[in-house]
Image (tube, rainbow, N blue to C red):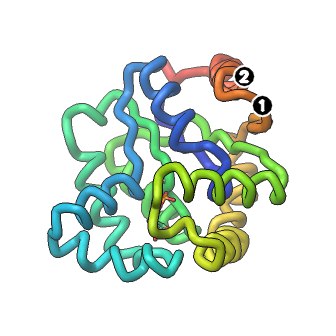
Amino acid sequence: MRLVLLGPPGAGKGTQAVRIAEAYGIPHISTGDIFRANARNGTPLGREAQSYMDRGALVPDDVVIRMVSDRLDQPDAQDGFLLDGFPRTVAQAEALDKILAQQDTGLDVVLRFDVPEDELLRRLLERAEIEGRADDSEDVIRERFSVYENETAPLVGYYRERGILRHADAVGTVDEVTGRALGELAQVEEPA
Ligand code: AMP
């Protein structure tokens, strides 16, 4: 299963990604987690990413694409993967298509989590209190929403046109949403 999770900040992608990846036995690849780990360890990549993350801006496409390309070359990603937080721009989506075409493969499904916007803001402010993520302050959250609308939302159309887009209603308990997501994915025909 080669799968992308799509959805606005606060849609619960990260939480669901862990469960879905486990259900399919595929690696969970979160670009945000990779950047945060690099930032914690003070690597050059982490230092570069930090300034963008702190503002709620996107890390430049070339940096992210190179990082994901390297990650998808790893042995554990050859038979499937779950991407969480990538692609976030049309340029990233096109680059991903190219990377997979070079491996003679492609995405099986893009699953979009649907959540109303007022619910998203409430969840992100709550997460800010619990996890203390630096980019969960109200100003930065608003910036991340606006980046999502302008840069990432167009991917819904991009993948719909390719016939691989599915939706899951992401309002409810974590278990309910996992159940819906797995129900949607179970309907995807895996290539022979
Ligand atoms: P996330 O944990 O997915 O919300 O990502 C946190 C932050 O990491 C984002 O606000 C961006 O600054 C950066 N980031 C993560 N993934 C990407 C991506 N695919 N493209 C650009 N920036 C990204």
Amino acid type indicated by mark 2? Glu
The kind of secondary structure element at disc 1 is loop
Q: Position of residue 70 (x, y in %)?
A: 23, 55
Answer with left or right where residue 6 lies relative to residue 35.
right
Residue at image location 20% in from the left, 41% down from the top: 74
Residue 180, compared with residue 135, is above or below; it is: above
Q: Position of residue 31 (x, y in %)?
A: 39, 56
* Distance Cα–Cα, label 1 vs label 2: 6 Å
Label 1 neighbourhood size at 10 Å, few (<14), some (14-19), many (20+)?
few
Q: Are marks 1 and 2 in contact (CB under 8 Å)?
A: yes
Residue 104, compared with residue 130, is above or below; it is: above
Amino acid type indicated by mark 1? Gly
| Residue 64 falls in image quadrant | bottom left
Residue at image location 15% in from the left, 69% down from the top: 43
Q: Nearer the viewer, residue 118 or 145?
A: 118
Residue at image location 24% in from the left, 32% down from the top: 76
Q: Where is residue 179 in the image (x, y as percent from the top left)?
A: 68, 19
Q: Nearer the viewer, residue 83 or 56?
A: 56
Residue 119, compared with residue 155, is above or below; it is: above
Q: Position of residue 185 (x, y in %)?
A: 64, 24
Label 2 neighbourhood size at 10 Å, few (<14), some (14-19), many (20+)?
few
| Residue 63 falls in image quadrant | bottom left
Q: Mark 1 points at which residue?
A: 172
The kind of secondary structure element at disc 2 is helix
Mark 1 vs ligand 1: CB below 8 Å: no
Residue at image location 38% in from the left, 20% down from the top: 25
Q: Name the residue under label 2.
A: 176
Answer with left or right where residue 156 lies relative to residue 79.
right
